Amino acid sequence: MKTDPGRFFEDFRIGDTIRHATPRTLTVGDTALYTALYGSRFAVQSADAFAGAVGYPRSPVDDLLVFHVVFGKSVPDISLNAVANLGYADGRFLAPVYPGDTLTAVSEVIGLKENSNRQTGVVHVRTRGFDQHGTPVLEYCRWVMVRKLAERARPHREEVPSLPDAVQPASLGLACPQIDGSAWSDALSGSPHRFGDYRAGERIDHVDGMTVEEAEHQLATRLYQNTAKVHFDGHAAAGTRFGRRLIYGGHVISLARALSFNGLANAFHIAAINGGRHVAPLFAGDTVYAWSEILETADLPGRKDVGALRIRTIATKNQPCADFPGRVEGGYHPAVILDFDYWALIPR
Amino acid sequence: MKTDPGRFFEDFRIGDTIRHATPRTLTVGDTALYTALYGSRFAVQSADAFAGAVGYPRSPVDDLLVFHVVFGKSVPDISLNAVANLGYADGRFLAPVYPGDTLTAVSEVIGLKENSNRQTGVVHVRTRGFDQHGTPVLEYCRWVMVRKLAERARPHREEVPSLPDAVQPASLGLACPQIDGSAWSDALSGSPHRFGDYRAGERIDHVDGMTVEEAEHQLATRLYQNTAKVHFDGHAAAGTRFGRRLIYGGHVISLARALSFNGLANAFHIAAINGGRHVAPLFAGDTVYAWSEILETADLPGRKDVGALRIRTIATKNQPCADFPGRVEGGYHPAVILDFDYWALIPR
Amino acid sequence: MKTDPGRFFEDFRIGDTIRHATPRTLTVGDTALYTALYGSRFAVQSADAFAGAVGYPRSPVDDLLVFHVVFGKSVPDISLNAVANLGYADGRFLAPVYPGDTLTAVSEVIGLKENSNRQTGVVHVRTRGFDQHGTPVLEYCRWVMVRKLAERARPHREEVPSLPDAVQPASLGLACPQIDGSAWSDALSGSPHRFGDYRAGERIDHVDGMTVEEAEHQLATRLYQNTAKVHFDGHAAAGTRFGRRLIYGGHVISLARALSFNGLANAFHIAAINGGRHVAPLFAGDTVYAWSEILETADLPGRKDVGALRIRTIATKNQPCADFPGRVEGGYHPAVILDFDYWALIPR
């Protein structure tokens, strides 16, 4: 058969290394589309002149655009038959990506666990993205629930990997050059609040809401060459329990990050993804809001230019976040769709 | 508070100078999106080879894209709490912008007038856009009705600025290099009609209609990093008197300008904006049509390459313009949404 | 009159050569949008690094993007008053197009035939696209049914051109440099199947479905500067027999081609278009599926790097293609919307 049916749970073996197809050159065309899709305003990524002044050769590609493209490469091999994308951990941005760079991706199977219903199992992978020089630019783990083709099939070996709750501050910052804080204009960046102005426990309502259209998430998800059919096939979706297309979870992450500018304007670089959970699905027509809690603040060993904020961003749908809807007894407030834990760098 | 609530009427003082956040590098990614959003066909902006032949180093960025980006920068500081964008005047394009240039913007408060209801007031600003070398590329005035936070608050000093009805021809053309009319191909530009073929009083129905979708105006408005929530938050909009998202008025200007190609194909450069009024709101699903009247024709002192047409473009919704709907006793024909008065340059 | 009413059937003469307006520089902005619109994943067009390894100086612009832009230029002159786009033949890609190249187009009228109803006639044109050096990049024939303005008008001379059923293999490949098959990574391209793995008569269901939104096809069609009003004017469309906007047929071709990656991943270059027929219209909200049959396999004289597959791709709406819906007695399966016959090159 020439078409690719994707791997089923029993097709994975721990230790498998899968080189993903379709290398992708990112360009200023992609970065313009990213701006049009999310309205992101972080100055380093928005303006070559600003990036150049503070220490980059030019504006780097938005960290999440890099993430989505690397993620997209892995979909045909890892999650074409996935029921659900369960979580992320240990994500680290390892080198900046600039327009003109070509990304490729490789995944390693690091865990397998069949579900008790014998219909599905959880596959854990570590995915790495590389540029055209072979330099690793991103690495992260994710786990997905994947269908079995044959109920009787058994996994070759089961094991659930142990992954860190959070990336250690000492390993942050590889994708961030030395930042010249004296050249950093707070007027241009949009906020006077720097590292020292944030405190663990602080909560920020990002205020604004963004309604999502079918055309928007489809454009985004195709831009990432993510082929998961649940995002595109409205005809097939009509027969599912949701009755409509599901929006790629990464689209929500990017929306929440763009909304978070209002309150975190100087937190310019996502250095690591500690964890992420898509609590509920988002559909076209829904409006996304977000709020964040500063979980932790950290110094970066050997660096005096930037500090790190560990940020937990909660996104909701159709519910503004003035009262910080989040975890409740037994789960989450019903409006919550995303619980995302990451490290961002911010100038001192 | 780390989030920005925006300025209220009483927060402005005449003479305030506000440097806006988020510098923005415009690229060929932005110009491609601009084409996809409006279908603009003016040859100078569409083709480096055409632009190069007639006197530009390469295709400049569309004038209205420059306008929208500069305007967008001013929104968080000027009009986040605006009730309505009332008008524009004295807009002049001062230097061409090319892909790769980074724009910043600064506004000066030039007028304040409280409304008699004490709930709102009108703020007049002069906004200037600059490139990365500090060269001014655009300057225009606008006035917006802004909410007061406290009814009892009083403006520091009230004054309504005197602004010209139209920009003087002598100050047009700074953003346009010397054009080599002999290299200007009418076959390629799409029309044989040059400066001498237009007469004051002439009316042109631009014929075509363009229906607008939610995804389109959202993509556009985010591309401009314009953060006015009325354009994006469908959940909140459901509770307003309109019941839905409002489309950014600049989107209508760009649609009308693109439609005007059919009849004004050689009027390649917007040199000045004399005035503009958003007569009624546009909503997704509406179809925009446009017609223009040549108000005036003018020589540019010292230039024999191009002349200037003063054009008044009226845009309507859901009503073709064969019978030129416009001003009527007591206001406008109910289909009119935009009344826009500008100077365009056109080869002789 | 300054607006262009377009040509009617009686305005064409056999032998007329029409130079089309609006030259267009294609950039990485356009290629990014093309990816976002269709999710295409062919490695040569997706990654400069892959293209560079196998023999291109960098990623060429997708063949169909070149086709759409050249086609778009011809619309105002050829098909503004068209009732239907009837077919294509003898299409050949003659030189690669790279970001930065500027395209222009010229059409020659090669056939005319009035319909018996005297209301319309069929116009046959050969359209050629050129880059900024005057190098031809694409040539194809199409025929369209065009309205007459005056029923009594008669065509100057009638003649129906004789066009080949298919382009000869000997004339394929001009737009494809020598490909280094040893540098072609099947892991990166997404398939191990090369020229020798396909057989005439083989059928491939491309499996995936893609739902189309109004905003998407409008963005695409405007990107191509295609001005046919049936795609954009929802207000006027409400009064037609379809009651809504028609989607540009080329949008369907691009969707089908992108879907065909799943089964034809190494068939990286469209070398020729043998024929194409838009069997039924597509509307927003419909989901497109596709399947292909290998009609023929052919060597290219003098080339050992690549072979040619003659592929017939059928696209359907709202009907998956597992049972290969196609021609039936008296016409087509009711779900079929496109029957497209082309030559693609694939490494040996």
Image (cartoon, coloured by chain):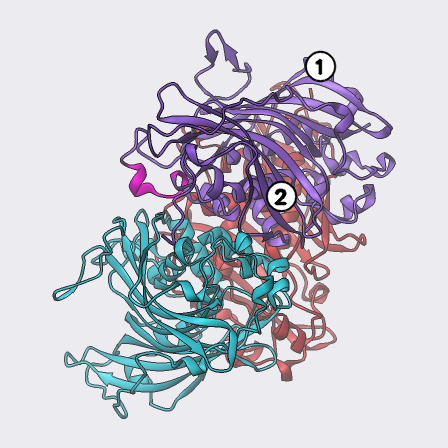
Chain colours: A purple, B red, C cyan
Left or right of C60? Residue C105 is left
Q: Which residue is mark 2?
A: B72
What percent of the width, then of the height, locates residue C29?
58, 57
Q: Main secondary structure of the magenta part?
A: helix
User: A1 or C228, which is in the foreground?
Assistant: A1
A45 up-or-down from B306: above or below: above
The residue lying at 60 percent from left, 54 percent from top is: A29
Specify few, some or many for label 1: CA neighbours under 10 Å numbering under 14, 14-19, or 20 or more: some
Whether the magenta-drawn stretch holds residue A236 is answered as: yes
Q: Which residue is at the front of the view, C104 or B231?
A: C104
- Which chain does tag 1 point to? A
Q: Residues within 10 Å of mark 2 (few under 14, many from 20)?
A: many
Secondary structure state at the residue bearing disc 1: loop
Q: Which residues are magenta?
A: A230-238
Amino acid type, callout 2: Gly
- B236 part of magenta stretch: no
Name the image quarter holding residue C245: bottom left
Q: Which mark is residue A200?
A: 1
CB within 8 Å, label 1 to label 2: no
Q: How many marks?
A: 2
Q: Is residue B275 above or below residue B74?
A: below
